[in-house]
Amino acid sequence: MKKLSWLVVLFVVFIIIHGVPVSAATEEVAAGKEILTKWQKAVVTLQIVSKQRISYGGRESSGDESKSEATGTVIDPSGLIVMSLFATDPNARMFEMLSDSGDIESQFKRETEITDVKILMPDATEIPAKIVLRDKDLDLAFVRPTQKPAKPFTAIDLTNNTTVGVLDSIIILSRLGKVANRVPSISIDMIQAVIEKPRTFFIPGAKSEAGDFGSPVFALNGKVVGIVLLRSIPLERSSRSVFGGMSGLGMLPVILPASDILEVVNQVPATVPAEEKKTEEKKPTETPK
């Protein structure tokens, strides 16, 4: 009986010491479930078909067509979607890394043409769309349906935003790939760092993966923090290290604040242009890196 009493005492002490974390975890789970229920339809899958041509030393390879999928966040009932520019052509950054030194850069040439974009809705509807604006510095791409939608999209309001600090809990809402039938996916993470210069970026924890690019991030109060994008900088070949993960290669998943995205949204065309030069990456404005 004396041994049992000590076990009871230890259990009570454990509850007292760890009561706050358990309570905090309960708050995170409740917030996550509410966000999932309210906003899952605002997170969609984008199917992108592209054709690339690579030439080296005057020899050009035949155009190979590829199909990929990426996550996008609907930010307007008209169907305007924000996504990661990197996700539209993941091979582009790798090509830059291979061709940014010596004579290789002058001999290698690569052109990519996005030939088709579709919005894969949660109800399995496929809606034709186009990329209407790109910002390479911020890793932003904006997509619009080519025709007015039959009914308004569920859209996240970026104006209802907030900021976060180191060790603050965040909720990331995404969608899994085709292998998981593109079901909504939600995770609880934590801010591990905040970059303030040359511009503000929130750095999510180790739980964030490449599949989160284009996904919205929320605070526990339900307000939008921003969108997961890719920050990349050129590194000299001697400075790169695969042992440092993505950051060792000059790349890092970041959360671009919602307020910064809104500044670029103002420059997005209201309609889809009749013709679009898909291979050209235009900068809508001079924005600091």
Image (cartoon, rainbow, N blue to C red):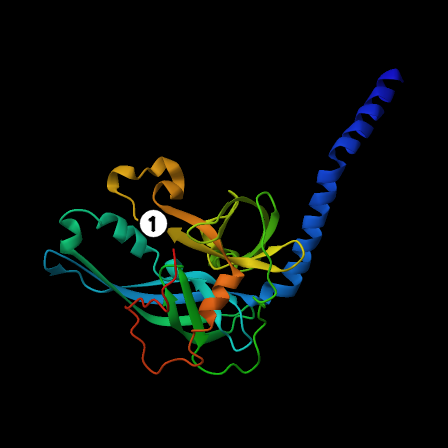
Q: Quadrant of the N terminus?
A: top right
The residue sitting at 31% across, 80% down in the picture is: 275
Give the x, y percent position of residue 170: 60, 50
Left of 139 or right of it: where is 31? right
Is residue 18 shown above or below 82? above
Is residue 169 shown above or below 176? above
Q: Which residue is mark 1?
A: 233
Q: Residue 195, can we see it?
A: yes
Q: Residue 45, can we see it?
A: no
- Determine which quarter of the picture holds residue 130: bottom left
- In this view, the residue farthest toward the top is 2
> SS of the residue at dot 1?
loop
Which one is in front, 132 or 262?
Answer: 262
Give the x, y percent position of residue 29: 68, 50
Q: Quadrant of the C terminus?
A: bottom left
Q: Residues within 10 Å of mark 1 (few under 14, many from 20)?
A: few
Residue type marked 1: Ile
Left of 234 or right of it: where is 102? left
| Marker count (numbered) | 1
The residue sitting at 19% across, 47% down in the picture is: 101
Give the x, y percent position of residue 273: 36, 81
The residue sitting at 44% across, 61% down in the picture is: 70
Give the x, y percent position of residue 24: 71, 44
Is residue 27 shown above or below 54? above
- In this view, the residue farthest toward the left is 58
